[in-house]
Amino acid sequence: MQFDQLMREVAKFGAVGGTGVIVNLAVFNLVRATTEVPVVRASLVANAVAIIFNYLGYRYFTYRDRDKSGRTRELSLFLLFSVVGMAIENGILYAATYGFDWDSPLQSNFFKFFGIGVATLFRFWSYRTWVFRALPTREAVHTAESFLERGPVDPHGVAPRP
């Protein structure tokens, strides 16, 4: 059963992430085609738009059943790990563009896409582990509920007799 849940989670993560990749690449190419913004800066703009899109998709689609308490913490961690993913993605693009002088539109898109793939592995792990934490399992909830059903406990830790 856990494997099935993981596969559903991976599919939902992939659906949101795949759409986010399209948003990322579309904004990247739009900025490159219509402005004189350098390649890595255009990529950073595209990343910012994709991060907003992805947060909404992950929170309200992929991980809608996860713990919703502490939204400030959740958003802060999401942004932190997204920035690390952005650094991975754009580090690869930067190395290709300025380290190897691979700056044609085809080369830029290839290395941007490759960087997105590497960063996605990091993001999947970090988002599911730290940002969108799982709620307790049913067994833990049942144990807690049965504990609460036992009734009040006196100050010495002894439950009253029925």
Image (spheres, rainbow, N blue to C red):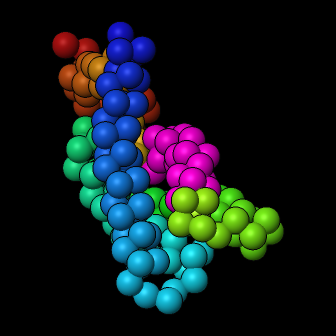
Report if residue 73 is visible in the image: no
Q: Residue shown at 23%/44% (left/top)?
A: 61
Q: Report the front residue among 155 and 81.
A: 81
Relative image position of residue 8 (x, y in whole percent): 32, 25
In the rendered view, tell whether residue 31 sits above or below residue 105.
below
Q: Residue shown at 34%/30% (left/top)?
A: 11
**Residue 6, quarter of picture:** top left
Q: Residue shown at 57%/41% (left/top)?
A: 121
Relative image position of residue 138 (x, y in whole percent): 30, 20
**Residue 49, quarter of picture:** bottom left
Q: Report the front residue among 23 and 16.
A: 23
| Residue 45 appears left or right of 101 | left
Relative image position of residue 19 (x, y in whole percent): 31, 50
The N terminus, quarter of image: top left
**Residue 15, quarter of picture:** top left
Q: Is residue 146 magenta?
A: no
* View extreme (right): residue: 99
State how many labels appear. Answer: 0
* View extreme (bottom): residue: 36
Q: Is residue 130 magenta?
A: yes
Report if residue 101 is visible in the image: yes
Q: Report the front residue among 49 and 31.
A: 31
| Residue 48 appears left or right of 120 | left
Segment tinted magenta in the rendering? 109-131
Please tell me whether the stretch drawn in magenta is mainly helix, strand or loop: helix
The C terminus, quarter of image: top left
* View extreme (top): residue: 1
In the rendered view, tell whether residue 77 sits above or below residue 60.
below
Relative image position of residue 72 (x, y in whole percent): 38, 67
